[in-house]
Amino acid sequence: MAIPDEYKIEEVVRKTENMMVCRADHPIHGTVIIYMPDDALPSEAAATVKRHLYQSGIQMRSISQLYLPFVTRALEVSQNPNEPYIITGYSKYNLEKLINEDVRLKPKRIYQIFSKVLQAIISLSENGWQTDRLNPYQIKLSDIHEGDATITALLSTGFQPTVTGTIPISKEERLSDTVTLPQDAILAGEKELRLVQRNIYILGDLVYQLLFGEKYHLSDSNAIVNIRKLSAKWRTVLDRALSPSIEDRYESYESMLRDIERALSRNKRIAIAIAPLVVLLLIVGGLFGYRQRHRYQIMTSEAGQAIKNFLDIVDKTESDFPEPSSVSQEPNDDSILKPFDEIAATHAKKE
């Protein structure tokens, strides 16, 4: 392949759909990912893969020019249909890798990831790119436990341009209260709805695998038990995404995103609600700490030390003083007159 010389390929990290995914280094872009056809393919298969990869490169270039949030951008794509390649920024992790390595994530982190994924899908849809079938490999992470997620619109089961057109409406139809759409338009709408619900089911299954380490099966009684272990705010999203009834599933990416954002913001609302109490506790704690510090400063001063020494002496000598008798005794007449008798006796001797 005619990869520019400034890209130094380090290793093949994956082979998928007859393509090689390589990690390479670039003096400006740093670590990058290069998608290219597998050199070991027979000529007929290689021609098909090259054509597909070249078309994907055109697609990636068009999407990259939109600068959509949380959508992977192509750094460079081949201009030669006989030697196609696509170069993107490097992400250390993707959801397929995490699932294969049995990595478990906390609900909050999982829903943060899928919030970004849904925002990317909605932005692509609003700009004319329809999500065909999601693949966990397309969802990239620079870090497992923090940071944003991006989605790569690359694989054949990825994103396709939305076919749009106008339906001619006659003057009579414009004047009427209702317009009956052609049957083909109704069928196309149903097909798009089922496509959205299938992808939402895929997202729900990915959430379940990242939470519990196994694929979701409707017939598995443990699956219901596992989902019931989640708090209500996380469980609501998963119940609707994986509902056995199509009527109960989400009908749009926007509705799923709203529920996820509501769940993620719930803790923030609780934190805001208790903020005044926290501030009050901090004030009380600060006043108590100030009083304790002020008391310490007094007790360590010269006057304070003198008071402390005096109190220590009192404490030490307190036990030397006789304790008053708890039983009061009334003096008798003899004890009262005894001193006077002694005086009289002494006076008699002198005489």
Image (cartoon, helix red, strand yellow):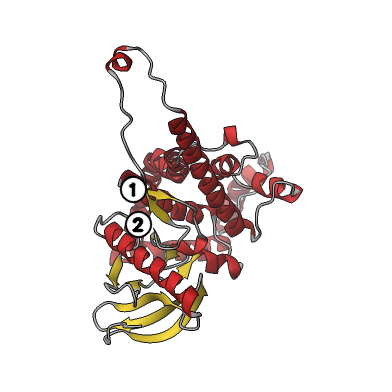
- In the picture of the structure, the residue carrying the numbered disc 2 is 70
Residue situated furthest front in the rendering: 44
Q: Label 1 crowding class (10 Å Cα cut-off): few <14, some 14-19, many 20+?
A: some
Which quarter shows the N terminus? bottom left
- Residue 254 is situated, as x and y percent measured from the top left of the image, at 42, 40
Work out whether residue 92 can be spotted: no
Q: Give me the C-alpha separation between circle 2 and circle 1.
A: 9 Å
Q: Are marks 2 and 1 in contact (CB under 8 Å)?
A: yes
Q: Amino acid at mark 2?
A: Phe
Q: Label 2 crowding class (10 Å Cα cut-off): few <14, some 14-19, many 20+?
A: many
- Residue 189 is situated, as x and y percent measured from the top left of the image, at 45, 35
Which quarter shows the C terminus? bottom right
Identify the residue shown where x is 70% and y is 49%. 223
- Residue 6 is situated, as x and y percent measured from the top left of the image, at 26, 86
Between 29 and 282, which is closer to the camera in this rendering? 29
Identify the residue shown where x is 50% and y is 59%. 135
